[in-house]
Image (cartoon, grey):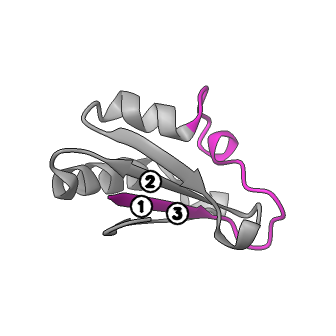
Amino acid sequence: MIKIQFQQKNHEFLNVEKLLHLPSEIEDYLIQQIPELEFEASDNEADLDDNLILYFSGQNETELFLQITALLRNMIQNDNNMTFAVSLVSDF
């Protein structure tokens, strides 16, 4: 399982799509860009609105992990105050 966590400190509400200028939900965008990726679930930490956690799966999760990380690094600008972490997890 691949876990992606977005966070924006010192903000009450995180809008990933607005910060990345996306016309659709981030999970839909990632699936369009990486077709082997399958969306599993979304969550947030401690029921706070300043973060978003997405879970994905796929055949070669190590390769998908690398593709997601590269894609997000290219998309997230240093000045938008949002961070992300991509990790491989055994379950969610």
Q: Quadrant of residue 26?
A: top right
Could you tell me which residue is drawn at 50 percent across and 39 percent down?
Answer: 27
Viewer-proximal residue, 88 or 84? 88
Q: Quadrant of residue 39?
A: top left
Q: Are marks 2 and 3 in contact (CB under 8 Å)?
A: no
Q: Residues within 10 Å of mark 2 (few under 14, many from 20)?
A: many
Q: Quadrant of the C terminus?
A: bottom left
Vertical order, 64 against 24 (above or below): below
Image position, residue 32 (x, y; %): 38, 27
Q: Is residue 13 left or right of residue 51?
A: right
24 in magenta: yes
Residue reaching furthest to the right? 12
Residue matched to label 1: 3
Residue matched to label 2: 55
Could you tell me which residue is drawn at 74 percent across and 66 percent down?
Answer: 47
Image position, residue 69 (x, y; %): 34, 57
Viewer-proximal residue, 77 or 23? 23
Q: Going from the N terminus, do you reach mark 1 or mark 2 first?
A: 1
Q: Secondary structure at mark 2?
A: strand
Report the amino acid beneath label 1.
Lys
Q: Are marks 1 and 3 in contact (CB under 8 Å)?
A: yes
Q: Nearer the viewer, mark 2 or mark 3?
A: 2
Q: Is residue 18 left or right of residue 36?
A: right
Alpha carbon separation for disc pair 2 and 3? 9 Å
Residues in magenta, as a range: 1-25
Report the amino acid beneath label 3.
Gln
Residue matched to label 3: 5
Image position, residue 30 (x, y; %): 42, 38
Q: Secondary structure at mark 1?
A: strand
Q: Are marks 1 and 2 in contact (CB under 8 Å)?
A: yes
